[in-house]
Image: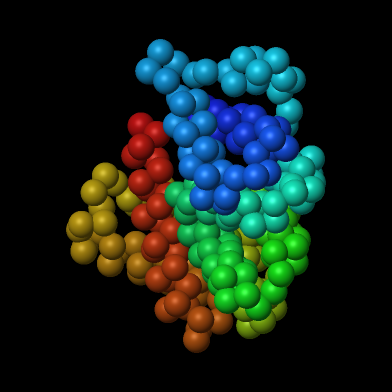
Amino acid sequence: MRDDVVFFQAVQVALSKRASSEGKTDEELDHAMRQIVSRAVVPDGILDVFASAGLPKPDVSILSDDFLNEVRDMHRPNLAVELLRKLLKGEIKARRKKNIVQARSFTEMLEQTIRRYQNRAVEAAQIIEELIQLAREMREANARGEELGLSEDELAFYDALETNDSAVQVLGDEILCNIARKLVQTVRDNVRIDWTFREDVRANLRRLIKRNLRRYGYPPDKQEKATKTVLEQAEMFSDGRANAQ
């Protein structure tokens, strides 16, 4: 998280100085922000910009209510929109390495919101509120696994089961959670390094996934799509394990 922390610290310093920069254009402000961020990471290590500026270190999480409220109160709404867009995009990019379904869903929501703003369909103030709500939904998504009693990996496979589909919801959370746990174990037991290049391994894993879905009564007409999504999630899962090793 080092680079993320440095980035948020740098942005906080930039925002604290915005009062003296009101006469500058958006392009100049954006350029200045990029310069601050680029200088925040130096070859000799991390530059603590808060200590240099004599400022206390706040909660730098982009999903914290304090940070979101600070952004809401910025005097330049268009700059606040751009800041939220960049931070949320970065958060989604990080999620894509863990949970492809969540990443896709949040990407679509972010793109739709920004598109409406770029088309001048809504004012900046309304877009800021929508982006803040999106940030809060991301935070709530982090807590879903704990509520369901699932690990981070298990939650990713749970989401891959298209659990928002009404035909799937009839199975209930308990059964869907059991399927997710079984899928994680199946993937762990059957994938190896570079398995994605071996069609025989992929075919066997596809067969095992479908067997688990049938075993727990997953809707037959939804099985093919779910199997494809689970396989995609399995690729992310195995890549993450390989990088960790």
Q: Where is residue 108 shown, x and y percent of the image?
A: 54, 69
Q: Is residue 33 left or right of residue 209?
A: right
Question: At 26% from the left edge and 44% from the top edge, which residue is drawn?
Answer: 193
Q: Can residue 63 be seen in this view?
A: yes
Q: Residue 12 versus residue 236: which sits nearer the camera?
A: 12
Q: Can residue 84 be seen in this view?
A: no
Q: In this view, does 12 lie to the left or right of 210?
A: right
Q: Where is residue 168 shown, x and y percent of the image?
A: 62, 77
Indicate how the structure is coloured in the image.
rainbow
Q: Where is residue 92 shown, x and y percent of the image?
A: 53, 53
Question: At 50% from the left edge and 86% from the top edge, which residue is drawn?
Answer: 221
Q: How many marks?
A: 0
| Placement of 130 over or under 12, stated as above or below | below
Question: At 65% from the left edge and 66% from the top edge, which residue is drawn?
Answer: 175
Quadrant showing the C terminus: top left
Q: Residue 211 versus residue 187: which sits nearer the camera?
A: 187
Q: Residue 11 versus residue 111: which sits nearer the camera?
A: 11
Q: In this view, does 215 lie to the left or right of 15?
A: left
Q: Where is residue 241 shown, x and y percent of the image?
A: 39, 40
Question: For residue 127, which quarter of the picture?
Answer: bottom right
Instruction: Name the residue at the front extreme.
Output: 23
Question: At 48% from the left edge and 59% from the top edge, which residue is drawn?
Answer: 100
Q: Residue 244 versus residue 223: which sits nearer the camera?
A: 244
